[in-house]
Amino acid sequence: MRNYSLLILWLIFSACSKEAKKLDFKTKAYATIKVKQAGHTNDSIEVSISHVSIIPDDYFKAQYVLNQNANFLHVPVDRPSRATVHINGFAQNIWVSPDDTVAIHLSPTGKPKNFSGKFVSENEYFMAKKKATGYLSIKEPVNQMLRTFDNYNELKDAVDSLAEIQMNCLKNYKEELPVAFRKMEEIHMIYNAAILKVQFPLFNQAMQIIESPLPGSFYDFVDELELNNTQAISSVSYFSFLTNYFWKDVDQSKLKQLQGKERINYLKNHLVDDANRYLNNEIKDYFLAHHLTDIIRLYDKTKLDSIATKWEISINKELVTEIIDQKALSKEVYEEDTKVDDFEMYSPNGEKIHIRDFEDKIIYLNFWAPWCKPCIANIPQLNATIKDYHQNENIVFINLAIKSEEEKWKESVEKFNLQGLNLFSPKGEKHEQIKTKFGITGLPHYVILGKGNIMKVNYANKAPKVKSQLDALLKPNN
């Protein structure tokens, strides 16, 4: 009966005009964040802010130093949504919206104390929630408990318990909150917990935390969720859940054999197939528009237009076209035969190293992370390839860990005996710039730079297939 009712509702919505049901995402909008210090001090304040957009699918993170004379910053946002701000090392979620301002008032100790502006009630709730739970996201306590689980059901129970604590915090919050915000917070909690449960089996394959087999009933919890949830279209957790749920059936053996654009295309095409199978037309349109705006850095505008047609994006076609045009003009990703800007990396002992330090060599740059199963799987072949070139002074192999924790990186380098030059990029604005300029949408990601730090091959082959590309560049007169 419930499914029949949903069908009737869907038919009613389908009969409405696109304008009536379309949720507008903003492509060139900003929220303003003001940080106000206590008293009249002019001390500098270190502030970092992060935000995830849905359409376009972008992760923004930046760091600032503010003072009384320059106490505001602008954050690109596509819709009313949460952002995360770190002020003097203190983390806090805040609610932001395009073209609106949030003012954060600091206590004498430099921590957020209260708020002013349009979203006072929402932001005071976020502060109360963190005080009650001790964390911003249930990912934090789950990550701390990972190695204590003996089976998959223990993980599910732990995630559900933490999600229930958060849900009760919202239900028991006495102050008035906008109805729409309460609903979005519930949606965020539900799908955020679901993401952790869906992601864990693949994560466990790489890290081997739980030895017992995956129960056949493990994914039964998905039956209690709405795959087609029109109320969740503005929730990034919802889209992330759908993505990870659809990816659980990816052929991992085939995925291991692919790299670069082939790998990304395989994953995206899998999403298209599952979107056609499980999602109604409206949700599918938003979901595919979300993913199309993630891969725009890989293709020229002509091919992207054809992909948008192939994926049958209609509700958001005008928006996607606008985003494609913007990206085509920006030329964010390094093109072939362009010089790569200098950037910093760090050795295990903390020494700062620049990419320009290797301008006299050909560089095979391996972007990887300790949690990346394909990265780990390729280490034996990579080590063998490095050994083949160990007497050639014209080439250097750099393994640059990104999207990683420093200690886990060091442990993994030692555990897997990773050869070559092992370097680390700490999270932050420069880290995000590296990912953007190299067009990194997934790991591993391989790049070949020629002498002078000239981009030669982005999305290069993995070892040992990369040897033909390297040998071509190592020939005289190249």
Image (spheres, rainbow, N blue to C red):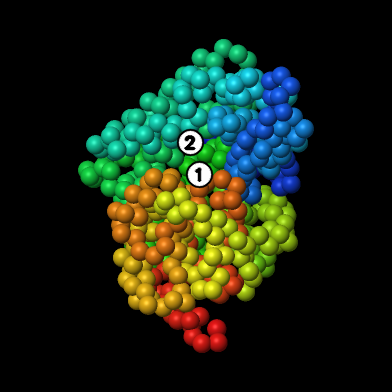
Above or below, 332 relative to 142:
below
Q: Nearer the viewer, residue 169 or 310?
A: 169
* Residue contact between numbered discs 1 and 2, judged by CB atoms under 8 Å: yes
- Secondary structure beneath label 1: helix
Furthest residue in direction left, as rendered: 212
Which amino acid does the dot numbered 2 rest on? Tyr
Which amino acid does the dot numbered 1 rest on? Ser
Q: Residue at x 34, y 30 (%)?
A: 158
Q: Quadrant of residue 89?
A: top right
Q: Residue at x 63, y 15 (%)?
A: 176
Rendering coords of residue 274 (x, y %): 47, 53
Above or below, 184 relative to 78:
above
* Mark 1 residue crowding within 10 angstroms, few (<14) / some (14–19) / many (20+): some
Furthest residue in direction top, as rendered: 174
Residue 420 lies left or right of residue 56; in this view the side is left
The residue wearing badge 1 is 240
Q: Which mark is residue 191?
A: 2
Query: Mark 1 and mark 2: span between their CA atoms?
Result: 8 Å
